[in-house]
Amino acid sequence: MAVVGASRNPSKIGHLVLRNILSGGFEGRVYPVNPSAEQVLGLRSYPSLSSTPGGVDVAVVCVPAITVLDVVEDAGEAGVEFLVVLSSGFKEVGNMDLERELVVRARKHGMRVLGPNVFGYVYTPSKLNASFGPSEVLPGKVAFITQSGALGIALMG
């Protein structure tokens, strides 16, 4: 798993997502991706997905919309199978062409995409909280999918 846009700044979404993944007990490999940082939250940072040691199946994308297409191409080169695009600035603000191009490029590489402009992805059996919501998520027997980030946060906490 990788967090593209992982940040050393605690107020940034990329920092919150990486912190939640690490503090939740996720046992898989996690790679922060940030070309401007050597380390993020104590982990070595990589300048791109294609520069990680490999094995990234899921990438959580927390970068400005204008750079997401470059991330999709990099993810395709790295063999990433699934993107969770938290970035906003797509059709919700009238950028239909950018969102269409995101889908076209992801399909070209055979990638699945959750997003853009989503709250994150939580899977409690793997202790994975790749969201910018509450850090502690209790396991249960209910699956919940919502379009509303506010509702998701309310039900998580």
Image (tube, helix red, strand yellow):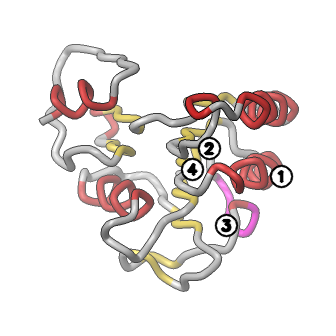
Q: Residue at x 56, y 41 (%)?
A: 85
Which residue position is annotated with label 4? 61
Q: Residues within 10 Å of mark 4 (few under 14, many from 20)?
A: many
Camera-nearest label, 4 or 3? 4
Give the mark nearer the N terminus: 1 vs 2. 2
Q: Gap in Å between the C-alphas at discs 2 and 4? A: 13 Å
Q: Main secondary structure of the magenta part?
A: loop
Which sits in the foreground, 76 or 97?
Answer: 97
Q: Residues within 10 Å of mark 3 (few under 14, many from 20)?
A: few
Tell me the distance, in whole angstroms, between the alpha carbons under discs 4 and 3: 18 Å
Q: Is residue 8 left or right of residue 139?
A: right
- The residue that appears at 54% across and 63% down in the rendered structure is 5
Instruction: Nearest to the eye among marks 1 and 2: give it.
Output: 1
Q: CA distance from mark 4 to mark 1?
A: 16 Å
Element on which disc 4 rests: strand
Q: Is residue 51 magenta-colored?
A: yes
Between disc 2 and disc 4, the foreground one is 4
Residue located at (67% from left, 28% from top): 112
Which residue was labeled with disc 3? 53
Q: Residue furthest right?
A: 108
Whole-Å distance between the Cαs marked 3 and 2?
12 Å
**Mark number, residue 77:** 1
Q: What range is drawn magenta here?
A: 50-55
Which residue type does callout 4 highlight?
A: Val
Q: Earlier in the sequence, mark 1 or mark 3?
A: 3
Q: Are marks 4 and 1 in contact (CB under 8 Å)?
A: no
Lower position in the chain sequence, tag 4 or tag 3: 3
